[in-house]
Image: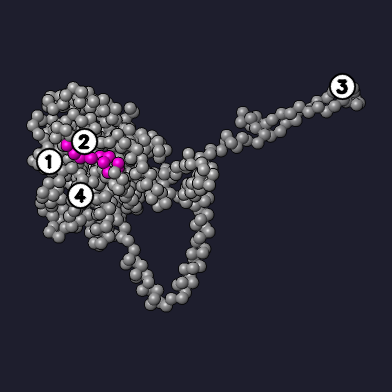
Amino acid sequence: MARERDLLSTEIVNRGIESSGPNAGSLTFSVRVRRRLPDFLQSVNLKYVRLGYHYLINHAIYLATIPVLVLVFSAEVGSLSREELWRKLSVYFMSRPRSIYLVDFACYKPHDDLKVTKDQFIDMARRTGKFDEASLEFQKRILHSSGIGDETYIPKSIMAQENCATMKEGRAEASMVMFGALDELFEKTRIRPKDVGVLVVNCSIFNPTPSLSAMIINHYKMRGNILSYNLGGMGCSAGIIAMDLARDMLQANPNSYAVVVSTEMVGYNWYSGKDRSMLIPNCFFRMGCSAILMSNRRRDYTRSKYRLEHIVRTHKGADDRSFRCIYQEEDEEKHKGLKVSIDLVEIGGEALKANITTLGPLVLPFSEQLLFFATLAWGYLFGNNRHPYIPDYKLAFEHFCVHAASKTVLDELQRNLELSDENVEASRMALHRFGNTSSSSIWYELAYLEAKEKVRRGDRVWQLSFGSGFKCNSVVWKAMRRVKKPARNPWLDCLDRYPFQA
C-alpha cells in the first residue's frame, strides 16, 4: 500500500465561481489524483544499462557479419570438387595450432622451522653482525610498510655469520624447493618423470654448472631425449617466458608433456652491505617454487584445469633507464646485490601500458574497444587527452593474478587498471602469506583462488608479471571446469584467516 501511494500525485484544481445552487457566488475547488511515473534514473541500475550496451554492440557485430560469412562460405564450397574440399579441410586441421592445456600445478610450501616474522628477521640480521644500525632501521621501516606478514620463509643460511652465497648453499636451496614442488606435481597428475618430453626451468640469479634443469633430470632419471632448457637472468617475469617456450615446444612436438619450474634462490641473492637501494630485495624476496604440467594431448582435455588462450610479452630493454631499473652489481665495498631504481613504479607503468595495448584487442569485448578508440579519436581531434578512457578489463577476466612484488606496486596497479579490492585479493594475500616469491608468485595467487573455490567453468584468468630488463608479460587461461578445493595446496592450513584485513 505504501509503495502504491508513492506512485500517486494529487493536484488541487480551481474550478471558478459557482453560478447556481446552494453555493452560488463562492469559489469551488476539486482534487485531481494522478498516477506518477516512476523515477527511472533512480530505479534502473546504471550498471545494467552499461552491460546492456556491451551486449547489444557485441551481438550486433555477430548478427551483421554471420549472414555475409555464410554466403561467402557457401559460394566457396560450391565451387570446389569433393577431392579439393577434403584436401583443404585436411590442410586446415593439420596446420591449425594445437590446444595447450594446463593439467595441474604445484607450489612448494617450506617447513615451518623456516618461518620468520618481521621482528625476528631484523633480530637475526642484527645478530649476523653484517649490518650497521642505520641499515637495520631502514630494513625495519621497509618491512613494516611492505604488506608482508609474519609467516614467510627464508633459508637459514642467510642468517649465518659466514658467507651464504656459495654454490653449496645455492644447490641445497634449489634441491629443497624444486624437488618439493615437482614431487607434489607428479603425485597430483600421476605421470612418471620419464613421460615428460620438455623441461623448462627459470631462475634468475643462481645459474650453476651443470644447470638446474640438469639437476632435475639427474634426480628423477628422466629420459635421454628430453628437450631441456634453463633460463637465467630474466627476472620475476621469467615464468611466463618459460611457459611461452614450453608452448612453442609443444606446438612442434605432438603428444607430449612439458614441465615448467619457476623459482629463485633467496640465499644466493642475499646482500649484506649498506647501499639502501640494494637492501630493498632483502626485505621482499622469500622462498618459493612452482611446477606446472602442460600438455598438447587431446586425451588430457577432460582432466585438465585450464586451456592456454594468449601469451603477450613486452620488453623495454632498448631504453637505458628501463634496462638499469633492476641491476645486479657490486657496491663500493664489493658486496654483490640487486640495485632497485627509485623509478621502478614509473617504468613498470610504462611497460604495463605497452603490454595491455597489445593484449586488449585479444581479450576485450568489441564494445569496450569501440569506446576506447572513440575517446582516443575524440582526444586527437579536439586536443583533450588529459583523461583517456581506460578499458574495463573486468569485462575480459573473472580473476586477476598480478605479480605480488610489493604493496606499493599493487596499489599502483589497482589504481591504474581500476580494479576492485576483490580483484587484487589473491595478490595481496599471497604477498602477505608468502612474500615476493619472484616468478612463482602468480601461481601462489592462483592456488589461493582454487583453495577458495572461486574458479568456475569458463572463467578467464589473467596472470601478469614484471621483471628486470625491463619486462612485462601476460598469460591468459580459460578454466575447463569448476575447480574444487585441491587436496594438496599451500593455503589449506591458513585459509580460514584469509582474506586478511590490514
The three-letter amino acid code for the residue at tag 3 is Ser
Q: Earlier in the sequence, mark 4 or mark 2?
A: 4
Please state which of residues 100 and 440 is positioned toward the viewer in this rendering: 440
Residue position marked by numbered label 2 in the rendering: 286
The CA distance from mark 3 to mark 2 is 92 Å
Residue in the picture at 67% in, 31% down: 8
Pointer 4 with pointer 1, Cβ within 8 A: no
The CA distance from mark 4 to mark 2 is 20 Å
Q: Residue 28: horizontal and vertical position, in percent? A: 83, 24
Residue position marked by numbered label 4 in the rendering: 231
The CA distance from mark 1 to mark 3 is 106 Å
Q: Earlier in the sequence, mark 3 or mark 2?
A: 3
Residue position marked by numbered label 1 in the rendering: 170
Q: Residue 119: horizontal and vertical position, in percent? A: 21, 24
For the question of whether residue 43 can be seen, the reply is yes
Pointer 1 with pointer 3, Cβ within 8 A: no
Residue in the picture at 22% in, 50% down: 260
User: Callout 2: 10 Å neighbours few (<14), some, many (20+)?
Assistant: many
Residue in the picture at 29% in, 47% down: 317
Identify the magenta region: 321-330
The three-letter amino acid code for the residue at tag 2 is Arg
Q: Which is closer to the viewer, label 4 or label 2? A: 4
Q: Earlier in the sequence, mark 1 or mark 3?
A: 3
Q: Earlier in the sequence, mark 4 or mark 1?
A: 1
Residue position marked by numbered label 3 in the rendering: 26
Relative vertical location of residue 141 with respect to residue 299 in this rendering, above or below? above
Helix or strand or loop: what does disc 4 sit on?
A: strand
Helix or strand or loop: what does disc 3 sit on?
A: loop
21 sits left or right of 460 in the view? right
The CA distance from mark 3 to mark 4 is 100 Å
